Amino acid sequence: MIIPLIIIAKIVSFVSRVFNIGMGGTWPGEIALRLKPDILSILIHNIKEGVIFISGTNGKTTTTHLLKAILEKDGKKVIINKSGANLVNGVVSALLTECDFFGKLKADYAVFEVDENLLPEVLKSVKFLKLKMIIVLLNLFRDQLDRYGEVDVIAQKWTKALQSLDSGATLILNSDDPQIAYLGIKSRAKVRSFGLSDNKDFVIKKEHATDSTYCPKCGHGLSYDGIFFSHLGIWKCFNCSFIRPKPEIISNLPILSGKYNKYNTFAAVLAARECNVDAEKIKSALKEFKPAFGRQEEFTIQGKKIKVLLSKNPVGFNESLKTVINGGARNLLIILNDRIPDGRDVSWIWDVDFEMIPESVSMVVSGDRVYDMALRIKYSKSQILNPKSQINPKSANQNILIEPNLKKALEIAIKGIDFGDMLYILPTYSAMLDVRQLLTGSRRL
């Protein structure tokens, strides 16, 4: 049964690539799962050394690509779900793409980013895996409330799923996130912790997009010595004495810009250490690393520079804004969609601190929900322009332009920047795919 199934899956993947309809990142797996529901557990047992699952609200793709780069620097063959398809069908598709017609794999490691809502399902499928298994949990923030609900819902699912792990598995947890740190207490697996330690990274004031500052153990309010962003920080509970686990020291490494990328890097480094990669190879891989699609990805169009920063929820958007503002941004293209990958509920934009954007920054707003975004920005800025307006969008206090058509919005934004300047694009997930297609001529990642 498995041989014809694999043949069908490979044909589907091939057709998808040839006709430029995506990367075949989900359909091969979707078909295989319908024909043989246990296909994941069958294929994954053929990995030689170990399997690493990476989950969390933000940072999955970047951390996955970072870890892949490090392991490959160590001479390992690595499979990832490179298109970012992080549902079960995406994981299965990645395995089907790499296996031969008998289901055999030549990979030493499989590194998969996994949707936070489906991590329990994936772990259940590999419950009896004999290989080294590492689970990296990055963070939990509000994201797609219409689909996931509040972070507590995901945390409860994770707690139950991780309790079934045996002592042979390893959990790599973000100690700055109370919900994530608490998961280590409830599991029999080995636990390693990462986190920030530099007081210079503390925010001056609490952000709107702060999700949970209550103790996951007893429910009382947590006390913070400092907050890095949202609810991530150096915390403790005076009621039950639950304190932030001390993170392992990780220093003197090249890191992508943005505080959130420190977390992504530290998580990848800790996973690499667990795979016995030496320090020099880790450092070398990080130095050569190029960002994954849409994650600080750079383009040059008409001699002008463009950088895309995926911004899909309040915390991620705030961190993107901080990164580009600290980088001296003068031109932004903000794109808001509400398709299935983005979540239909866009009320989260009211938790984004658009007020931090300087008045001197020129903005073009676009996307399926352009007017929702424009309304949000209206409450933080002076005036918004219609594209038919003859007013110069760069004039004082009149620097925001609405253009529902994304192609036109991109053209306006590029035309509006000077040579040597950078246009920063902040899109939601489906918007990122759309804008990349306009920039590259393909939705391939």
Image (cartoon, rainbow, N blue to C red):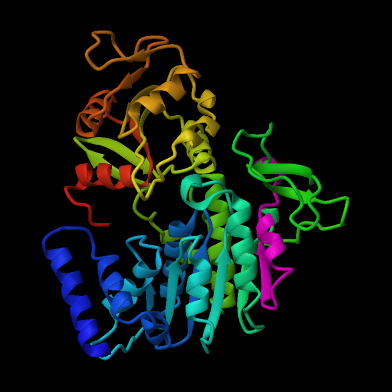
Measured along the vertical axis of the image, is residue 262 above or below residue 32? above
Quadrant location of residue 185? bottom right
Quadrant location of residue 20? bottom left
222 falls in the magenta region: no
Across and down, in percent, residue 356 comes to 54, 26
Image quarter (top left, top right, bottom left or bottom right) of the N terminus: bottom left
Across and down, in percent, residue 266 comes to 58, 60
**Residue drawn 42% across and 63% down?**
65
Image quarter (top left, top right, bottom left or bottom right) of the C terminus: bottom left
Across and down, in percent, residue 350 comes to 52, 30
Number of marks: 0
Tell whether 68 sits left or right of 18.
right
The segment highlighted magenta reads 179-201
**Residue drawn 83% across and 51% down?**
237
Say which of 7 and 444 sits in front.
7
Residue 253 visible here: no
Across and down, in percent, residue 45 comes to 43, 87
Residue 290 visible here: yes
Tell whether 407 sits left or right of 366.
left
Direction left: furthest residue: 19
Say which of 390 and 4 sits in front.
4
200 falls in the magenta region: yes
**Residue drawn 31% across and 75% down?**
34
Measured along the vertical axis of the image, is residue 416 above or below residue 191? above
